[in-house]
Amino acid sequence: MSRPRISPRLSLLVCLALWFCSGIYAQDDAGAEPGIQSMSVLTFAADGTLFVGDSKAATIWALDLGERPTHTPSERLVVTDIETKIAALLGTRASEVLIHDLATDPVSADVYLAVSRGRSTWDNRWQLPNDLTDATLLIRVDAAGQLEAVELSAVTWTSGRLPNPVAPDKQHRWKQGTSLRVDTITDIAIQNATVYVSGLSNEEFASTLWKLPYPFDGQATASTLEIFHGAHGEYETHAPIRTFLPYRLEGRDHLLAAYLCTPLVTFESASLAAGAHVKGRTVAEFGSGNYPLDMVVYRNQGVEKIAIANSNLPLMLVDPRDIEAYEGSITRETPGYTEGVRYEIRSGNGIQQLDRYGDEMLVALQRLPGGTLDLVSMSVRRL
Amino acid sequence: MRALLLLLAGSLFCFPAHLGAAEPRLETNPEHPWFGQVVVEPLPPAIVRGLSDHGPLDGARYLVVRVADEGGELPPILGRTVLEADRMRFEPRFPLAAQLPISMEFRGRRLARDLGLPGLLDDSLRSAQLPAAPAQAPAQVVELQPAEKQLPENLLRFYLQFSRPIRGHDLHRSIRLVDAVTGSEVPDAFVEIPSGLWDPSGQRLTLLLHPGRIKRGVGPHQVQGPPLREGQWYRLEVGPGLVDRSGRPVATFEHRFQAGPALRRKLVPQQWTIVVPRNAGDAVTIRPTVPVDSALIRRSLEIAGPQGAVAGSLEVQTSSQIRFRPAAGWLPGRYEIRIDPGLEDVAGNRIDRVFDLATHGSVGDAGEPAGAVATTLEFRVALPPAD
């Protein structure tokens, strides 16, 4: 690709101007490694572009992983005690290894993991990996279960910066010593050339949903979010979405979002306008004392379902038709912590990460009763 | 002919020495003993020459360092292998963990073969263990405020400053208020907050004495009475069980003090003593008439001088003695000490109101709040004439 020649000084001025204008983007810096500070969230687009949400830098990095063979997984993937194998790469013990996120490449079906050496500092049942330390290593697991580190110097990339991220000096209200900055980006989804990003901004109503056009050549917009949380019996604007996905309900695009203590909320995508304060419709309360960790859509024999992995509850299956059929909105305190759209449970305690693995399987990181963390695929037919 | 024989003899003599010498071994950096790297040395001169003639080689083909395991199936440790003079060095990408057992495999035969010098090197497999992490002094309490030997019986807070971040679990099993005479714990002395009230660094803990027991006329005070009683001696104890963020035990600590008369008057900064600096580099010393809250005072004092706000450092020596030293020295002239109305003494009394307003009987000077305005004290700096 040929590029017009621009003087270095002008380039610098333009870059600085772009950097300070909120929501405009730094472009591919040919040959330079992306300056990722924290791999908080990993998500693949359908074309195989890897999006890395970097809470510390308040930046979305889009990594082009290059040409690679297409692979449709047909065999089960099982990597037992993956923390010991990662520890071997890092020159440490399994007790130090912390996996922050997992995403499956839709092209190669390789599984990518964001990794750090911070698990031994875990001391609070409410801490999530990003609360402890920053993931700085990307590991690829191939279909044969072989692990290798991804050399970021070899990838080309672009990036988009989030305007007005939560300030690093703001502290979490009840997690000792945790900066809210770690929740600048809690999840990412890509749909219709738009990158949706959930997390915390520096607004008074901190829970925010950003939209960035992709490729990163336009203005990012932000909407602040408000929900009613039945288990707590109150409106909430500070807690961020923990996991979400775009889904079409009743012929209109929505975001389905789950929060801590597990309310499930729908937001109509069209309402997420620049600067809008958007109120979600709470359609379910799935139980208190729980982080919803990942939400994945899958299709089993032609029927779509949504699987939700949880920190303290089993694997849940939700039928989107039940969400469409639910006409109400939870606006009063929920006795017993559960209400609204029903869910089924499946064997899947201890699933810490979940994603699709081809069309016929899901892939999970699951902490087993023996204590090991295994990377395992599971057939959707068994769900 | 004789020369040829000598050369042959020399080769026979030296060859085994080369084969035996180039072995991998663990080298630890004395400044960071837990950080290890693996070296193979000395490489025979012919190999070194061969390497420099050959151009870049993939070092990972010849030196493989792994975490030792019985199955031998673990992937090699991430890192890079570099050639330095007569040695090959493996540098791990991340510091190796303390006491980690590793295996070091030098594939000398392959290297010699790839360089066209077969037989000049042998394979070698060695194991080693990283040294233990250097012993670190346990985390400890480095400051307690207020630290006076006599504290008012309606004291509201203690601040414990630790040398390292502390894990905030089950604090109240380890931190106790004890009757110094009987040795028995004062029950329900503190507001029990499961993970504690910490500053962002995780090093300063605020212990809040139960305000409901201190405030007269409310239920807990009437049922249990105040946690401290005038005239009695107490110990604030940081006992076993507290650990730092790495899980290492915190050194025990205790502070003995006597409960004195309650403080139930508004703060009157106009009665405070100000020791005026005599030289440009001296601190101004402020001595409140009652011990003030050591955390609040740090953000409640502002010094302004002839050229506006004065930058400098504030040192809370005790709750009753605060020193401020200007960063750039004093200029002769009039200065103001501005005191924010949010300042409290150690019993929660402010300039504009008393924490514990009695509901009956005499209220002294408690009265109604006077409104939140800053109080200003003045002092004048007159520096000695320059030589």
Image: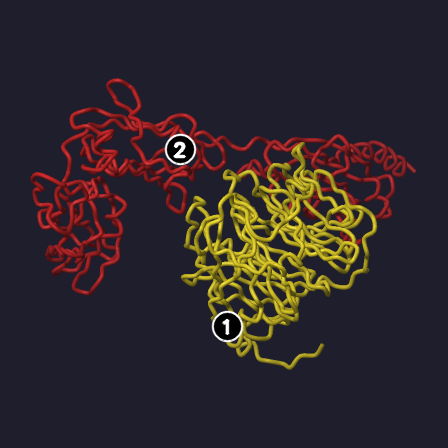
Q: Is residue B24 above or below residue A315?
A: above
Instruction: Specify whether B263 is left or right of B157.
Output: left
Chain of residue at mark 1: A
User: Where is residue A150 shown, x and y percent of the image?
Assistant: 69, 54
Residue on which disc 2 sits: B171
Q: Kindly identify the residue that appears in the image at 39 percent across and 28 percent down.
A: B173
Vertical position of residue B147 compared to residue A182: above or below: above
Q: Name the residue under label 1.
A: A274
Say if residue A290 shows up in the picture: yes
Does residue B354 appear left or right of residue A174 in this picture?
Answer: left
Look at label 2 and name its amino acid.
Leu
Question: Who is closer to the viewer here, B233 or A355?
Answer: A355
Q: Colour of chain A?
A: yellow
Q: Is residue B90 visible?
A: no
In the figure, the shade used to draw chain B is red
| Residue at (24% x, 18% y) in the render | B181
